[in-house]
Amino acid sequence: MKILSLSLIRGIIAQVLGMVTGMVLVMVVRVLVGLPAWKAEPAWVGGALFGVGTFMYGTGVLNDWLKWVKGEQTTEPSEQESSRLRGWQRFFNVSFDHKIIGIQYGVLSLLMMGIAGIFAVIFRTELLSPEMRLMLPDFFNTMISLHGIVMIFSILLGVAAMSNYLVPLLIGANDMAFPRLNAFAFWINIPASFLLLSVLFLGGMDAGWTGYPPLSANMAKMGFSMFFLGVYTFGLSSILGSLNIIVTTWRMRAPGMTPFRMPILVWGAFSTAIIGLTATQLIALSFQLVLFERIFNMAFFDPLRGGNVILFQHLFWFYSHPAVYVFVLTGLGVISELLPVFVRKPLFGYRWVAMSSLGIALVGFFVWAHHMFASGMESFLRVPFMFSTLLVAVPTGVKFFSWVATIWGGKMIFPTPMLFVLGAISIFLLGGLSGPPHATVATNLHLHDTYFVVGHFHATMFGGFVFPFFAAIYYWFPKISGRMYNETLGKLHFWLMLPAFYLQSLGQMQVGLLGMRRRIASYDPALGLDFSHLLVTLAGYLIFFSLILFIVNIVTSLRKGEISVPNPWNSRSPEWQIPSPVPVHNYDNPIEVVGEPYDYGLAGSIYINSPESKAPPVSAPAGD
């Protein structure tokens, strides 16, 4: 059967068979050690772990490594790509081409984002009115918990999509440093997604996306274990992908591309990868310990047996606050990358902007405990963490000053990517201005666990990732597909999403200031929050509708879009000097970097010498 030739289908079948086999093996082991054969949670956990392994085997992503173990000859990934399937089947099969993998990451990201959006629409409908009784509180809590964690991982997948597709192109490389590892890092996200979504069918989880014990450790619902395993598996992908980005950036740049001649987006991806490589282990460890507490009755976080529940929060937030910068640093790199193109001016303070990404990544490791001011941790820790949190504003401010100075006096044009860039700047500013109240101890204690936190976090994520992600898709769509998107639909998408988001985020902050707690299924009618919640919910519907418009635009443009000119944005960047879509081997002839990346508008300035181009790339369109 043709469908069985697809790696995805083979992997899913292998995962189901592997889960059943793993459950049987767990039962056999339990009998051998004198325990009753069946206990649901160990059986499901063992089956899930075994299923992840069999999924990866079934897809074929392990084939080359297994051949190497057996001493058999393997072919180079670049040679394999030349003989692989063409058309849509490429994206459902294992590929070692970073461009295919980047698109796979992007599609999975949008799929997970849509699922998380559906969860949001469901629980927001419950909050339309305090009298709403559409669902039980447990189901509401499961929806709000899954919305948070699924959206977070859709963002991580989106970051990986941009990094995988763009970094090799931007530095003049033909692929990632470790193509097989790159494919492995993507495909393990598929069973991880299944594990995360299986929470819905295994009792749910109602402890919030953070999964704090003792609630998550003591509840009998098996959904918690699937939640922990899903996050753990996603974390492995993040670590491996980060390693690949770091090595690729450090070792595979084109001749002449010194660090301070790299595109600024590469700096953002590199800084993101440093956090992903060094911090992800901490959330994996914290969730693994809770899982051990559930399965093996250990007592890491049980105060009655000598455990320390505050320890979980330290481990969890040591990753989860730097993870905020994992979400946004690549997005901020997109803003800095696209602004000079549409303003036709050099990026102001390039070196400062580049180093600010590393500065944010570094300082981000010293701010985690501002999430814990109300947790009961030692009070003398509050002040140093307050100052370190406020310090993050310095490298972030460098980026804002650069963007404003770049825009000042420029010859701006406003296609859809530029609109999303400007929207991202304004929304991220809202997130930045609403952040300091969480950093200072007095206001943090007042705002902790209210909807003000929710509004701030959404502003940070939409400004730092979601709007830049859409800007990147629209900007590089002609490069990916060879076709142009529908500009009218693109602008309609923007003008629906931007005001709807402001209404949503500001509404959340307003009800938070009035005392509305997050993760609550109802509220007191006497508080007068009905109208605000109505507006926030309607804004959520509008954002979801704008996402549908985006999908329609992309799908129809892929089939019927106007054929794009070679360099529609007149960019200096290397990827726009080669054909669209990009050939299997990106640069058949090596490029050489001979100038600065963002010298737009400077007569005679050249960034690269590319044999692919008939003429050196110009610095600005005619009339500049």
Image (cartoon, grey):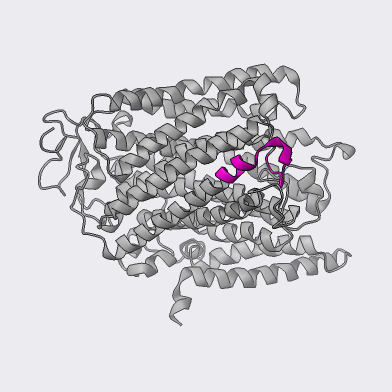
Q: Is residue 245 visible?
A: no
Is 527 within the magenta?
yes
What's drawn in magenta, residue-wise? 518-536
Report the front residue among 559 and 254: 559
Give the quarter of the image for residue 561. bottom left
Give the quarter of the image for residue 499. top left
Whether 19 is drawn above or below 102: the answer is below
Is 257 within the magenta?
no
Residue 153 at x, y = what percent?
55, 49
Whether 341 is drawn above or below 131: the answer is above
Task: Name the residue at 33% across, 63% down.
Answer: 556
Report the front residue among 15 and 441: 441
Q: Is residue 143 left or right of residue 612?
A: right
Q: Is residue 143 visible?
A: yes
Give the quarter of the image for residue 38. bottom right
Task: Name the residue at 65% across, 39% down.
Answer: 529
Q: Is residue 619 left or right of residue 14?
A: left
Report the front residue among 85 and 221: 221
Residue 397 at x, y = what percent?
43, 23
Q: Quadrant of the C terminus?
A: top left
Judged from this view, the residue extending furthest toward the bottom is: 1
Residue 536 at x, y = what percent?
56, 43
Task: Name the residue at 10% across, 44% down.
Answer: 615
Q: Is residue 237 left or right of residue 85?
A: right
Residue 473 at x, y = what percent?
36, 49
Task: Name the residue at 65% across, 22% down.
Answer: 443
